[in-house]
Amino acid sequence: MVITHSLGFPRIGTRRELKHALETYWQGSIPEEQLEREGEALRRKNWGLQDGLDLAPVGDFSFYDHVLDMSVTLGHFPDRAGLAEGSITDRYFRVARGRSGNDDRGCEIHAGEMTKWFDTNYHYIVPEFHSETGFSLNPERLVAQIREARKQGVAPKPVIIGPVTYLWLGKSKDDTDKLSLLDRLLPVYAELLDRITAEGVEWVQIDEPALVTDLDADWRHAFNVAYHSLKTSQAKLLVTTYFGDLRENLQLACELPVSGLHLDAISAPEEVARIVDWLTPLKVLSLGIVDGRNIWRTDLGRTLDWLEPVHDRLGDRLWLAPSCSLLHVPVDVDLEQKLDADIKGWLAFAVQKLDELSVLARALNSGRTAVNDKLTENARVIQSRQVSSRVHNPAIARAVDSLGSHAGHRRSPHSERVHAQRRHTVLPAFPTTTIGSFPQTTDIRLARQQFRKGELTDTAYVARIREEIAYCVDQQEELGLDVLVHGEAERNDMVEYFGEQLDGYAFSQFGWVQSYGSRCVKPPILYGDISRPKAMTVEWIRYAQSLTGKPLKGMLTGPVTMLNWSFVRDDQPRKDTAQQLALAIRGEVLDLEKAGVKIIQIDEAALREGLPLRRSDRADYLDWAVHAFRVAANGVRDETQIHTHMCYSEFNDIIDSIARMDADVITIETSRSHMELLDAFRGFEYPNDIGPGVYDIHSPNIPDKQDMVGLIRKAAERIPSGRLWVNPDCGLKTRKWEEVVPALRAMVQAAGELRQAAQ
Ligand code: GLN
Ligand code: ZN
């Protein structure tokens, strides 16, 4: 019999129960025991939803982050948290969330650093290593959950992060070679496996997704060392890889002395045959055949076509699973009441994906006829999506095709158009601006909500937003900023706002996915060819411009960010979808220009997020991503100034691509890294204007004027001061007006001081 299992299940609950439990606990409204009970209830429910599986994951649930949980299990808690008082739960959250400023004893407690989990939008807490790092086993959480699962009649398969990937995920704080810690780490893993087997567990899932990344000889060797050392364990280890293909690590993965290997057959279909050939005759091969990262229904017939021969060869050694943990998809599409019926029929969230898995397993175990109805229904749905006129609009394909190569090019190079722009828009040296959004007060959120529910008329809503825009413009004038914005009061989210106005996008009600901790996002669903029925921002921007004599910057979200923060159709290359988005946004850019807007910012906050895991795939991604941005931006006249914004500081590796975007001005996050970012400019002469963020908008603290002057002076060592702008790191929507006004006042004064010194 083919075994079915899953690598992990969404932990947030169908109604984001985890978020509510955590937030009420953090507010002090519920005690720790109640939080624990909520956790238990969620796990119970999740196992219930997975009861069609032969093996259910245990230990995939986490109150904040599974990597931090692994750190706890390995007794590897940042020292600063160990010194702090409080229960283990308190200390856990202190590392997870940090505290702003100082604690009551005057010590500063930083949050653990967070970074993206491979190429997903999930963020984990980075383990910190140094030469003294030690480990000691702390298995209670996992053991308790194994018992909990048992009690519920679930066959548990504990899930842990493998030792090599655990080191790979961490960061060395003192240049210690992370691999030098492997010897200290392995005995703790061995102990952990013993402890788990003592609970009567047979299989342990040990995640090693580092195997799908570029590894040098030392890291590859570490895999051999690690698994040879763990092979004495009684536990049967299923090493899992996901998010990519194994390539040069394929043989290594196949030959590890373990009992089974899981391969993500969605992202590495071409490796299945090679692995089947290579795997020793005793090992289990688990194939991820249902996409764990996207929300489309699987074509069951087509999957069986290639899976049946594999099954013929492997027999009971074949296991089936989703490609990766289902953490990255929403829980249950059946909850959706407002989705269009066609589109809803095309979707599978976590619960539906597990159903697909059981159908496939039954088809293999008992023949296709045993699940004939299901297969017929599936074929009908797949077919309806393939031919739907909601998905395919030939006019759009034609418009993209007819774009021509000049579409991505400005008429003149930056060095020339800069003069046209200076004549068109007169600005002082070190011009000041902001990134777009201003505080989103409860009042504004309420107005948007009421409008959505139909409790506020169109006219009343427009009046309310205009009032907010007027207030925002007024404040900026008073502060003396040079390039103003309208403040984005009408936007709930920078992707959703545009998605809602484009054809080809749909929105779920409950399609939440964890981003980090209690934070969830609800990515829009990009299901079909993209077009823009009408202008999306022009009226608001035109109104804002009418209120001031200063230049007002129009504000858009770029095509690559729209793509990277959505669930994207899987029936055409992402590159093609990006082109369609680019064309739609290009239309908006041109409409803004026609409306007299002289400066247009196109945010590409998520451009870096789409970067492939493998270095050799990056150039291709960057090529089409940059091209998409250029198509969106570059239809304008020379005198129109294009800005872009990116909110991260790791630029060094992609700086030349950023330059190729050819935006006249780029605003970037820099203050938290104290302009380390500008190192990128040491070896690369960035040709256009730059606004390195001079203060961190994530902190409520009012930035110090002198600090900001210092930062810009530092920047001026690398970049000619005539090309520097002065602005915050990112948008201000999460801040309060009381914080924003003094912060911007100090920023404007800092620019004033720089100007004076330059005279
Ligand atoms: N214009 C957006 C804002 O200011 C940019 C947000 C972002 O970069 N994430 O909110
Ligand atoms: Zn930003």
Image: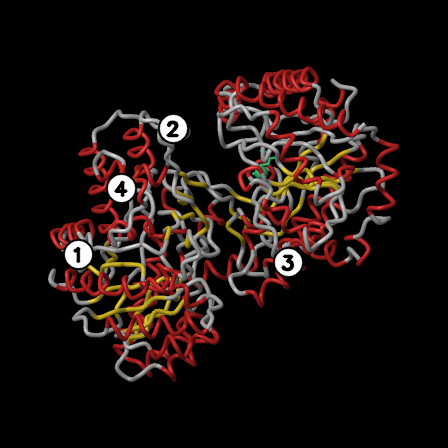
Q: Are marks 1 and 3 in contact (CB under 8 Å)?
A: no
**Spatial separation of the CA atoms under disc 4 and disc 1:** 35 Å
Quarter-of-image position of residue 309: bottom left
Q: Type of residue at label 3?
A: Leu
As shown in the figure, which amino acid type bears the numbered disc 1?
Val
Callout 1–callout 2 Cβ contact below 8 Å = no
Looking at the image, is 75 positioned above or below residue 759?
A: below
Q: Give the numbered dot on residue 154.
A: 1
> Which of the two labelled residues, at mark 1 and mark 2, occupies the earlier sequence position?
2
Tag 2: amino acid? Asn
Image location of residue 13, percent across then percent down: 31, 42
Quadrant of the rendered image containing residue 424: top right
First in residue order: circle 1 vs circle 3: 1
Residue drawn at x 41%, y 50% is 329
Q: Secondary structure at mark 4?
A: helix
Q: Give the vertical position of 162 relative to 590 (above or below).
A: below
* Labels 4 and 3: the sequence-earlier one: 4
| Residue position marked by numbered label 2 in the rendering | 102
Name the residue carrying label 3.
Answer: 622
Task: Give the label on residue 82, or none.
Answer: 4
